Amino acid sequence: MRSPAHDTASSRATWDRLAARYGAQERFETAAIDAALRLAAPQPGERLVDLATGTGLLLRRLAARPTRPREAIGVDASPGMLARVGSLPDGWSTLTADARAVPLPDGWADVVTCAYALQLLQPRQRAELLAEARRLLAPRPSSRLVVVTVWSEGDHLGARLRRGALALVARARPQTWGGLCPRDPTADLARAGFAPSQRIVLARGRYPSLVLAAPAPEGDPPPAG
């Protein structure tokens, strides 16, 4: 998971430093990434943007699927993380940029994905990232956003204890385990105009994760405040 950042420069430096060992934890993310790709289901004629792509695990898992989009771009502020992505199919690329300010035209994407990033951000940063996702999505009913966060579902004792333990570890070791801070981003999505239509929870044998899919909203976006 990624650790919290106070600004883009410090975040970039942190992730450049952690990039060399980040791949060791990808096995804990794979199940949720695959679930996200099932919900996103990008088609051959579509274009996808993966915000905060990191080492490109989602892009690499997508590249191995029999059905994949004609174009896909992984966006991350850390050159060190992007250097770990590896080779991609023709027409795919990476882009060094803040996920809240992507140098692509409005409506460029049919699918926007964002895995294991929202739980790292402060409220305003989450609003800015989701506003950017909305801007990037083409204004069509078929356009969709899929996000993944760390989360343990439910109000029963086991789920509460799991969330508490994750939050404790995240606070104790923010540079290495800060990304384990649990977050259900449903309310953040609603404020950005997204209404999640699909929800998958993965609880065992991996990072406890929540996967949400939402169609692109209609109308003008609300302010990212």
Image: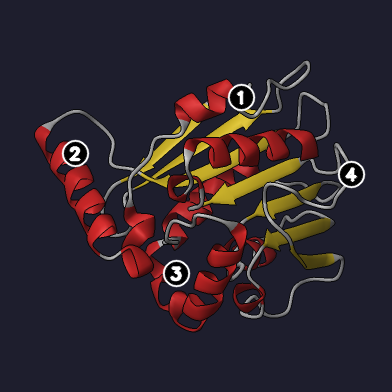
Q: Label 4 is placed on what type of residue?
A: Pro
- Return the residue at label 1: 194
Find residue 139 and report its image quarter.
top right
Residue pictured at 22% horizontal, 44% vertical: 163
In primary-sequence order, the first of circles 4 and 3 is 3
How many C-alpha atoms fall within 10 Å of the one at disc 4: few (<14), some, or many (≥20)? few
Q: Vertically, is 81 above or below 40?
A: below
Q: Determine whether the residue tagged by mark 1 lies in a helix, strand or loop.
A: loop
Residue pictured at 68% horizontal, 20% vertical: 222
Query: Marks 1 and 4: which is nearer the front?
Result: 4
Q: Label 2 is placed on what type of residue?
A: Ala
- Nearest the camera: 143 or 34? 143
In primary-sequence order, the first of circles 1 and 4 is 4
Task: Report the label total.
Answer: 4
- How far across and down, in percent of the image, does residue 92 sit? 81, 65
- Nearest the camera: 117 or 175? 175
- Return the residue at label 3: 26
Query: Marks 3 and 1: which is nearer the front?
Result: 1
How many C-alpha atoms fall within 10 Å of the one at disc 2: few (<14), some, or many (≥20)? some
In primary-sequence order, the first of circles 3 and 2 is 3
In primary-sequence order, the first of circles 1 and 2 is 2
Real-space Cα distance between discs 4 and 3?
A: 31 Å
- Return the residue at label 4: 105
Real-space Cα distance between discs 1 and 2?
A: 26 Å
Q: Label 3 is placed on what type of residue?
A: Glu
Q: Would you say the residues marked 4 and 3 are in contact, meaning their CB atoms lie under 8 Å apart?
A: no
- Return the residue at label 2: 159
- Nearest the camera: 9 or 74? 9
- How far across and down, in percent of the image, does residue 108 sit? 86, 43
